[in-house]
Amino acid sequence: MSSGRPLFRSHSERYPLDLFSYTREAGYCLDEHRFLAAIAMASTAIELILNRDRRLRTLPKLKRISGWATLNNGNLRVARERGLPVHTLLSPGEDLCRLQPIAFVELRNKVAHGEIGHFVRDLSDYDPDAARLATEQDSKMRHFVSEWYNTAPDVQEGHIRNHRWPS
């Protein structure tokens, strides 16, 4: 799978439909200048993989809320230990060992909780900072999904069939 905007892939039936939907929606939102939605969709695509990839599904080390593994530095450290391409989400100079969330997680949290006043100073679809941040979030997500798809046992061993995650 390439990390370009369309996320070209071979064996498309091994690309889960829900993940396809979030990655596609992120791109469409970005195209339509719906930058907050693009950030939310890109972030959710990563969180979806954290919850569906068989290498992580039953790990007690993942922090979960009502059974759902949340997007945070600790869970990303666990995912990295299990072979997921977490490095693609890091900005230059970042690591997962610090207390403060990495930029990808922090932006997701700010958008999800409505704390956008410090980076959106105009209508969000006209704000150049929102555009830049959404583009960065989308790019990181696409690199993560591409590397995940190209290396994940669920995909490579054919456990994902007919666009559905294994049960």
Image (cartoon, rainbow, N blue to C red):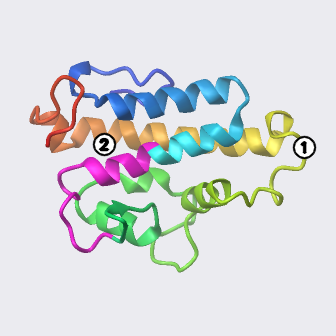
Q: SS class of the residue under badge 1? A: loop
Instruction: Write the residue at 61% across / 62% down.
Output: 106
Could you say where residue 101 lies in the image, as x and y percent from the top left?
55, 69
Type of amino acid under label 1: Asp
Crowd class of label 2 (few under 14; some 14 to 19; many from 20; radius 10 Å) = many
Residue 157 vs 31, above or below: the answer is below
What residue range appears in magenta? 45-62
Crowd class of label 1 (few under 14; some 14 to 19; many from 20; radius 10 Å) = few
Foreground disc of the pair 1, 2 = 1
Residue 88 vs 160, above or below: the answer is below
Residue 83 vs 3, above or below: the answer is below
Q: Is residue 80 left or right of residue 5?
A: left
Type of amino acid under label 2: Trp
Could you say where residue 88 lies in the image, as x and y percent from the top left?
44, 50
Q: SS class of the residue under badge 2? A: helix
Q: Is the N terminus in the top left, top right, bottom left or bottom right quadrant?
A: top left
Q: Is the C terminus in the top left, top right, bottom left or bottom right quadrant?
A: top left
Q: Residue furthest bottom?
A: 99
Q: Quadrant of residue 38?
A: top right
Image disc number at residue 122: 1
Q: Is residue 11 left or right of residue 29?
A: left
Residue 69 vs 52, above or below: the answer is below
- As for residue 61 lying within the magenta part, the answer is yes
Instruction: Write the residue at 42% across / 62% down.
Output: 70
Q: Residue furthest front?
A: 66
Residue annotated with mark 2: 148
- As for residue 122 lying within the magenta part, the answer is no
Could you say where residue 166 lies in the image, as x and y percent from the top left?
15, 40
Q: Is residue 157 left or right of residue 81?
A: left
Calculate the distance from the C-alpha at mark 1 to the C-alpha at mark 2: 35 Å
